[in-house]
Image: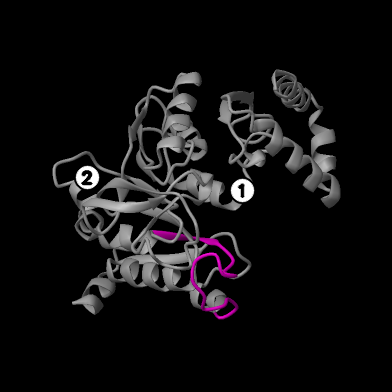
Amino acid sequence: MRMAISFKQMLLGLVQHMPSPLIRAAYRMPFVARMGSRLLKSAAATGEAQIVTIRQGPLAGMKLQVDANTPHYYWIKGHDEPAMLNVMKEHVQPGSCVIDIGSHIGVETLMLCQWVGEQGKVISVEPDPVNFQALQTNIQINNITNAQLQPIALSDQSGKLHFIHGQGVLCRLVDDPNDPTIGPQQLITVDVLTLDELYAEGNEKIDFLKIDVEDYEVQVLNGATRFLAQQHPALIVELHSYQSAMGCSEVLQKAGYDIKLVDTSQPDLMTYLATQPRTHFEQGFERCHLLATYSENTSHQEGDA
């Protein structure tokens, strides 16, 4: 057993020292990329915490705790959603206060902490206990001091809700634990608040929200109507289904926001949705990101009255 773990650690170490041009070349060959992905996933699944150095991308040189559920592109080739990151960076300034909702193990949190600087702050929200432990570790090993970590979920109600646990980036809240589409998942209960409760009037100004909650986006926004009306932050929301896209669009436009897609060939949401199946989570919808910015145009507000 120890020999197998040592071999896996050697494999991780070897990849850590591969020249970047060789890594980029490997990713251009689908067979090699798939084989490498399986090997890296196996190497990370030793039962022990593995700390690696991020090789490329905006976090190059920083450390990351990984396991079998960690997407290997986080630390091998850099983040795989550059359009989304570029838009985030445009809307996050030094000194900004940002909420990262659904922060997983903290990859985007680490970026946001760099962008806001010492005078800014990132509130990182992650309910899954496994992810949250890795999030804490990644904040600590990179000596980050401007992050505030919240081990909760956000929705349109407070209390406790069922949560699919231990699935890495696919952890999520579920309304019905007996839903047959969920399958034999490991369910736990987690503490839940609304954004309206978490940031009531009088709290600091929030400049930007990132929401990635695996098809629970509408519930998060429905629990933030007062927050959005008072704070008017810019938002980037990862959409996971046709229903989520329609629901988020309705809530945000009613709140006076202009919306567009940032990582598709078609920035108009409705035009894009015409190409997508009207299916639920994980049933063929091509995930995309919605950028929402508050408009001072009073016609929005008058139309909503």
Outermost residue, left side: 202
Side of 261 where 147 appears, left or right: left
Instruction: Give the mark, 1 or 2, whose residue is nearer the N terminus.
Output: 1
Q: What stretch is highlighted in magenta?
A: 274-292
> Residue 72: where, in percent of width, then height?
66, 39
Quadrant in the picture for the C terminus: bottom left
**Which residue appears at 79% of the width and 31% of the height?**
20
The stretch drawn in magenta includes residue 286: yes
Circle 1 Cα neighbour tier, 10 Å, few/some/many (<14 / 14–19 / ≥20): few
Amino acid tagged 1 = Pro
Circle 2 Cα neighbour tier, 10 Å, few/some/many (<14 / 14–19 / ≥20): few
Provide the secondary structure element on which disc 2 rests.
helix
> Residue 264: where, in percent of width, then height?
60, 64
Quadrant in the picture for the N terminus: top right
Given residues 169 and 242, the one toward you in this image is 169
Q: Mark 1 points at which residue?
A: 82
**Which residue appears at 28% of the width and 71% of the height?**
254
Res. 198 mark: 2
Res. 226 mark: none
Prevailing SS of the magenta stretch: loop
> Residue 106: where, in percent of width, then height?
48, 36
